[in-house]
Image (spheres, grey):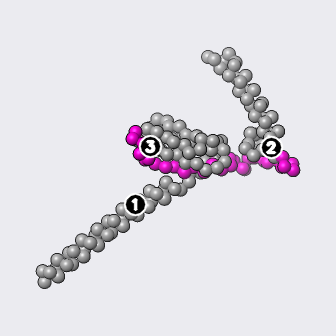
Amino acid sequence: MAPLLLRLLGILAASTLTWGTMAQAHAAEQVNAEETRALTVALNFATVVRVPDDTTTLVIGNPAVADASVQRNHVLVITGKSYGSTNILALDKNGKPLRQIRVQVKGGSPERTVTVQRGMDRQTYACAPHCEPVLTLGDSKDAFGLLNGQINTRNAGAAASPSARQ
């Protein structure tokens, strides 16, 4: 009977190890699934996520698509800059990856925008409640360039004003 008991204990121990290994594998799959799921950010909007406490470096795969900055308490602010996908890596002081965040940047608030298409030319307006032209990627070169020039001129004038220097 003793050999039978030892054999049963061996089978029990082996099954416990197998279940423990399976649980660890499942936990690793969940972490990987979380890191491969894309965070959706609207164009020209920001969202907030946390990075691990020992993060010392951020690497942005394509800074033309999204920007990121670390604030206090390891809060990461991600801003959508243009349509597309990229990733952000949080690294520790030794360069070891701590977290990967996939970022998908999509259009802003379509419920308040109107897009006017004239042949191949397109211009976008923000309508809340009056419609005003808005700088939007994909608009025609003329509409985009004109509005961009106006915005840059306005911002330069504001930066040069005496109240901006105080």
**Point 71% across, 24% down: residue:** 156
**Point 77% across, 30% down: residue:** 150
The residue lying furthest to the right in this view is 119
Magenta span includes 91: no
Q: Which mark is residue 91?
A: 3
**Point 58% across, 48% down: residue:** 86
Give the residue at mark 1.
27
Task: Give whichever of discs 1 and 2 has the lower sequence position.
Answer: 1
Residue 147, x across and y down, in percent:
78, 35
Tag 3: residue type? Leu
Mark 1 vs mark 3, foreground winner is 3
Give the residue at mark 2.
140
Distance from label 1 to label 2 (Cα)?
48 Å
Snapshot quadrant of residue 23: bottom left
Instruction: Judge by depth and name the residue closer to the eye, 77 or 90.
Output: 90
Q: From the image, which quarter does the N terminus lie in?
A: bottom left
Instruction: Judge by depth and name the residue closer to the eye, 89 or 159.
Output: 89
Element assignment for label 3: strand
**Point 16% across, 79% down: residue:** 5
Tag 2: residue type? Ser
Magenta highlight range: 93-121
